[in-house]
Image (cartoon, grey):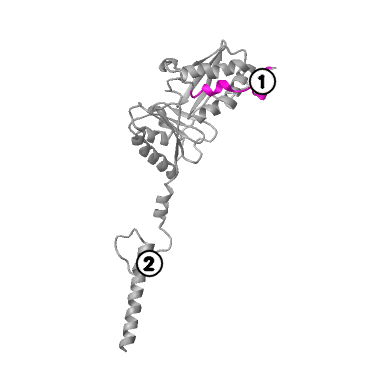
Amino acid sequence: MAATALRVWGAAATAAGLRRRFCHVMNPCTTKKQSLHQFLRRPLFLPHGALCNTVRYMFIQTQDTPNPNSLKFIPGKPVLETRTMDFPTPASAFRSPLARQLFRIEGVKSVFFGPDFITVTKENEELDWNLLKPDIYATIMDFFASGLPLITEETPSGEAGSEEDDEVVAMIKELLDTRIRPTVQEDGGDVIYKGFEDGIVQLKLQGSCTSCPSSIITLKNGIQNMLQFYIPEVEGVEQEYEAAYSQSSGNLHPFGKLQHYTPFPHIKSYLQ
């Protein structure tokens, strides 16, 4: 009888030891010990609230731009898909809940939405991106988890071609949309057609391009050269709010790469 009792006691002790090890491995974050009975009574699936909390986490990549004050955030899901939208001031962000939240972060100067990215520009070079990025990450993740619409009020963009466009304007817009804008968007910005008069093309730079110190030089050396090469009617290119930017830098980003493009057959055919 004593031997039997000893074997029973040993089995119970062994089970208790296994129980403690099992609970420790499967539940390493618990601060209070659980009995095996309590552990087995736990729900198999997480509550709905716990699942919702895990959805808010997403992988956001960042990409440098030619402008040291602008950083490109790539959330891994569509933003505006086929278009862009610029928010140069907090007042302009009334149409977008996400843009309004980003402007509430101290040090954010402007916000730009691309097809699959968000460009944030800080106020000055002294601000450390390492201090701004955590708040920007959290704001973007919270917004996409909320399910709110990115844009709540649409405004006419004025970018689409119309029946009133003559042949020269149509060629300018096609060259911008097919060759120039995609390249600029890779650097976190955009270039918008604003008009053509007396041989001068009016363009507006957005996103990382707006405060880039080399924007005027690259506008002339990159975009202007390309437009003049394919469209002889173009005599020059001017930027809206040109006085707001510096011409002191000789760096040819983000438009400098455009001046080395080879001829494009589908554009050249319009000129023959």
Q: Main secondary structure of the magenta part?
A: helix
Q: In which quarter of the image is residue 245?
A: top left
Q: Give the range drawn in magenta.
A: 253-271
- What is the x, y in percent for residue 158? 53, 24
Residue at the disc numbered 1 = 268
Give whichever of discs 1 and 2 has the lower sequence position. 2
Residue located at (69% from left, 21% from top) = 269
Q: Which quadrant of the figure contains the C terminus?
A: top right
Q: Residues within 10 Å of mark 2 (few under 14, many from 20)?
A: some
Q: Is residue 254 magenta?
A: yes
Report if residue 131 lies within the magenta region.
no
Q: Which of marks 1 and 2 is in front?
A: 2
- The residue at the point 61 percent across, 24 percent down is 174
Please determine whether, in this image, residue 180 is positioned above or below residue 6. above
Return the x and y of residue 147 as percentages of the image width and height. 45, 43
The residue beneath circle 2 is: 22
Q: Position of residue 175 (x, y in %)?
A: 60, 23
Q: Quadrant of residue 159?
A: top right
Q: Residue at x 53, y 36 (%)?
A: 81
Residue in the image at 39% along x and 27% along y: 69
Q: Quadrant of the N terminus?
A: bottom left
To which quarter of the image does residue 178 belong? top right
Mark 1 touching mark 2, by CB under 8 A?
Answer: no
Q: Position of residue 206 (x, y in %)?
A: 47, 25
Secondary structure beneath dot 1 equals helix
Look at label 1 and name its amino acid: Lys
Regarding residue 250, the answer to whether it shows in the image is yes
Residue 135 vertical placement versus 223 (above, below): below
Q: How far apart are marks 1 and 2 (CA)?
A: 73 Å
